[in-house]
Every structure is written in structure tokens, then in C-alpha cells.
Image (tube, rainbow, N blue to C red):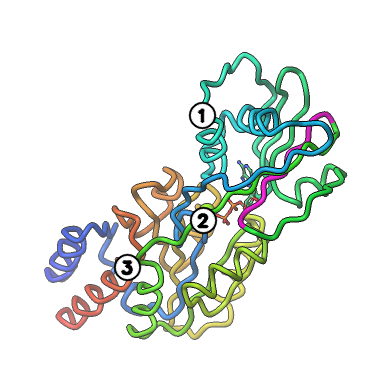
Amino acid sequence: SIPLSFFGGIGCASSNGILVKGSNYLEALSATKYIVFDKTGTLTKGVFEVTASYPENGFDKETLLGMAAYAESSSSHPISLSLKKAYGQELDLSRVSDIEEIAGHGVCARVDGKKVYVGNMRLMQRENLTVTTEHKEGTVCYVAVDGTYAGCIVISDVVKPTTKDAIAGLKKNGIKKTIMLTGDANETAQRVAAEIGIDEVHSELLPADKVAQVEHILNAKGEKENLAFVGDGINDAPVLSRADIGIAMGAMGSDAAIEAADVVLMDDDPAKIALAMKISVRTLKIVR
Ligand code: ADP
Ligand code: MG
């Protein structure tokens, strides 16, 4: 039988907006030593703003952004939402067909019959498209139309106001190492990591690379040391399942992530991770 105080712990967590899906996760949480984070939407707000755009090869800014917004019409990725918001016009979906979302790369679609690619440098390289603009600021979205590079759109994300203190709080609560995994470019990843005090960073990862990184840490850590993964996206579901404890952002997170997680933070606040650990340690003390 489950000791009664476990219910007290789960109840206390719940009244703080932390949904713990079972008493075993409270126990697992109390022994967590490694915390691995996804970047976008987890440590950062995931709400990007377009800060600049650089059309090339005869395209103008309006057409560049329009092509991107149309190609992104069916995606719910934070980048996609920002591009559509920046375009600001109602999308006539009859102009778009053959939409394909390419995980960790971007999207591809036909817009007015033209083949449009929107995504990162890796996507451009994969499609043998020559990018002529060089940008290191923010997250850069490259656009190609019918095999011609059309320019890039620079968007920038900001870290959540509580992230830096949350990371410091985890270190004070006995966490040995904090690690950030991201599909974003290395420059952006390093800048965010330095700003928030993360110990280790791995960038430019595909969803499968994130699972591999987590498995690498799982294999190297001690037996009684648990690894928690914190994420929000559809791509994060496999890692959330693979970690000793999966923690999902509940407010802006994808249904797949919430489903795969063991613990859900209802308000997406990373500071709640240290609080969940404190509640788990206190509960375990009463139980033992
Ligand atoms: P993260 O690991 O930061 O959560 P993802 O794995 O979701 O990021 O995406 C990795 C990268 O792939 C993004 O930084 C972006 O360059 C590109 N990408 C993914 N989805 C899209 C999209 N819908 N539109 C444009 N670019 C995208
Ligand atoms: Mg993400």
C-alpha cells in the first residue's frame, strides 16, 4: 500500500500548480541529480519576434515574409507562430498544398504552386540551396522559393524571467549538473546558456540526437542518481519517456509532451522544479 503522506505530497504539489502523476514519481524526484532541459519554450518564452529580414535575389520583405507564413500555415512550432503573427494577414489556405513539417529542420510546402522551404541552415544544405546572407544574431529562418534562395528572417526569443534563478536554485538543492539540449544554432545556444548559468550545452540537435544525449548521461550516472528531462514540444515526447522523470510545461506545451510526462508544471515556470524537489524530499522524510 502507498503511505498516506504520499497523497499529502502530491496534494501539496498540486496546490502549487505541479501535477505529479503518481507517488513513485515523487520518490524518483527526490533522488534527482541531473536535469536536462530543452531550450525553446522551456527555458525561453518560445514567443519569438521578427527583428529583421533580409530579402535576396529580387524578393522584397513583404513577399519573403508572406512565402514563409504561407509555407508555415499548418505548423504549431513557436517559430511558425511568430512568422505568421509578424505577417499579420489572414492566410488563404487554398494557396497552399503539399505541406511537410521536417523535424529539427523546418517546413516545406507549395505556395501558389511554387516549392517553398523555410527553416535552418541544415535544411538549406540538405536541399543544396546556397545561402548568401550571414547572420549570427538570434534564430535565423532561411527561405527558398523554387530552388532560389529568397533571403532570411531573423527572430529572437527571450529567456523566461524566472529561468536564471530557477537554475541557481536547483544547484542549491543538490543538483549536480544542468544540461541544455537544443535544435537551435550553436551561437544562440551558447548565449542563452551563459545568460542563465547552465553547466553544459549541446546544440544543433535533431530530435533523435536529444534521446542519444540523454541515454549517454543515463549510462554514465550513478545508480541512485536520477535524471529529469524538462521539455514542452512534440519532439520532446521520446526524451520525456526515456528520462527517469519527465517534466512537461503544461500551459504552452504540446499534448504529446504533457501525455508523455510524469510531472506537469501547469504554469510553465521553471522555478517550480526546485519546489517540486523540495516537496518530494520532505514527503520522503515523512514516509521513511
Ligand atoms: P528546440 O530544440 O530549440 O526546441 P526544435 O527541435 O523544435 O528546437 O527545432 C530545431 C530547429 O529547427 C529550430 O531552431 C529551427 O531552426 C528549425 N525549425 C523547426 N521547426 C521549424 C519551423 N516550423 N519553421 C522554421 N524552422 C523550424
Ligand atoms: Mg522545444
**Residue 233's x, y, as percent?**
49, 50
Give the residue at mark 1: 88
> Which mark is first along the chain, 3 or 1?
1
> How many other residues sit within 10 Å of disc 2, few (<14), some (14-19) or many (≥20)?
many
**Nearest the camera: 1 or 70?**
70
In three-dimensional space, the C-alpha distance between marks 2 and 3, rounded to whole angstroms, equals 16 Å
The magenta segment:
138-146
Q: Which residue is mark 3?
A: 271
Residue bearing the label numbered 2: 40
Q: Is residue 247 magenta?
A: no
For this view, does 32 lie left or right of residue 155? left
Q: Inspect this view and state whether residue 1 appears.
A: no
Circle 1: residue type = Gly
In this rendering, the answer to whether 217 lies above or below 229 is below
x, y (%) of residue 50? 56, 44
Who is closer to the viewer here, 270 or 223? 270
Of 241 and 3, nearer the camera is 241
Magenta: predominant secondary structure element?
strand
